[in-house]
Image: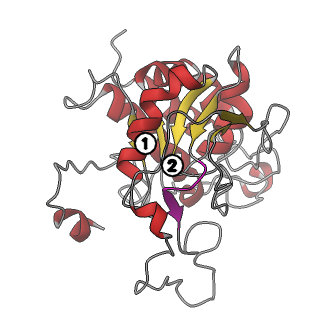
């Protein structure tokens, strides 16, 4: 990953590293500490340390690092880095398994520019549908729907609301940052946050190697083929958002208020570290 980043020449780049990672602290928190409970250990019987989640499972550093990393990254980008801590407009977030089509940059610019006028309930803009497997409706409409996690654009106003919900984010028993947002953070606001996107995707999730479908114990290492790019239609090589299109609203589906989470986030040490990330750039 570092080698790929070092080859980028078309724009300015700043690489940042999470300082409190289980990779850097493999034998102490947030990695595994001596005496930590494992799996479904009974602390009284095993004489180990830890607070289990709602399903009786103790923390796994590999799992909880997903949520910690996203939260640390957001706090650092918005409130820590000199280059961005006074930036108020939209930032677009993509991950290493997201493939951008050539029109992604211009399309997200258009969506962010027209969002407040075309969709007053839209807090964010997206490059792809909420359903990561969907290609879009391919109609001549803009789409108002639940915020997805591929190519989402957030401005400082939205970040301030997210940061203000740090307690909800850090205490909700789910190791996924996005499900935590949908099931705990957003429901704590006065209105449901929608996202604006086009009828065709401008970014796509590729590959199957990852936490949920990747490496398994006792199985060969997961390797995604790197010879082919995801399929793309010719229409997706150029900007294809028309700001005159009407907005079609889709209802909020999936994880919402009332869902208790998938667990993995029951240990009070993770809750405290999460809250520490929220406070690290703020003077008391």
Q: Are marks 1 and 2 in contact (CB under 8 Å)?
A: yes
At x 56%, y 52%, the residue is: 128
Residue occupying the far bottom of the picture: 220
Residue 127, which numbered label? 2
Is 201 part of what is drawn in magenta?
Answer: yes
Query: Is 220 on the left-hand or right-hand side of 107?
Result: right
Residue 56, which numbered label? none
Is 196 part of what is drawn in magenta?
Answer: no
Residue 134 placement (x, y as % from top left)? 67, 60
At x 59%, y 57%, the residue is: 63
Quarter of the view holding residue 215: bottom right
Q: Nearer the viewer, residue 229 or 47?
A: 229
The residue tagged 1 is 108
Quick one: label 1 or label 2, which is nearer the N terminus?
1
Residue 10 placement (x, y as % from top left)? 16, 57
Query: Is 201 on the left-hand or right-hand side of 104?
Result: right
At x 35%, y 47%, the residue is: 18
Residue 216 placement (x, y as % from top left)? 63, 80
Q: In this rendering, does residue 276 appear at all?
A: no
Residue 17 placement (x, y as % from top left)? 29, 50
Q: In this rendering, does residue 218 appear at all?
A: yes
> Which image quarter holds the N terminus?
bottom left
Task: Give the magenta range.
Answer: 199-205
Residue occupying the far right of the picture: 258
Count the numbered circles shown. Answer: 2
At x 36%, y 48%, the residue is: 105
């Amino acid at each position: 990953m570092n080698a790929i980043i070092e080859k980028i020449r078309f724009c300015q780049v700043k690489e940042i590293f999470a300082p409190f990672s289980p990779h850097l602290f493999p034998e102490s928190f947030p990695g595994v500490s001596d005496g930590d409970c494992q799996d479904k250990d009974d602390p009284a019987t095993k004489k180990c340390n830890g607070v289990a989640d709602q399903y009786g499972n103790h923390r796994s550093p590999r799992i909880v690092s997903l949520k910690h990393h996203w939260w640390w990254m957001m706090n650092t980008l918005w409130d820590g880095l000199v280059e961005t801590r006074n930036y108020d407009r939209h930032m677009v977030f993509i991950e290493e398994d997201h493939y951008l089509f050539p029109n992604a940059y211009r399309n997200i610019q258009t969506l962010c520019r027209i969002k407040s006028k075309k969709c007053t309930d839209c807090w964010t803009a997206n490059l792809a549908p909420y359903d990561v497997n969907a290609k879009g409706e391919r109609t001549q409409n803009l789409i108002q729907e639940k915020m997805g996690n591929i190519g989402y654009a957030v401005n400082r106003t939205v970040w301030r609301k997210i940061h203000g919900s740090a307690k909800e984010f850090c205490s909700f028993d789910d190791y996924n940052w996005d499900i935590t947002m949908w099931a705990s953070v957003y429901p704590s606001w006065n209105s449901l946050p929608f996202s604006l996107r086009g009828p065709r995707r401008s970014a796509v999730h590729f590959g199957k190697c990852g936490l949920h479908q990747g490496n398994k114990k006792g199985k060969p290492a997961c390797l995604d083929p790197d010879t082919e790019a995801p399929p793309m239609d010719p229409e997706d090589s150029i900007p294809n958002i028309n700001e005159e299109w009407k907005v079609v609203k889709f209802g909020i589906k999936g994880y919402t208020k009332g869902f208790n989470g998938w667990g993995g986030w029951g240990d009070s040490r993770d809750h405290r570290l999460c809250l520490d990330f929220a406070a690290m750039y703020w003077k008391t």
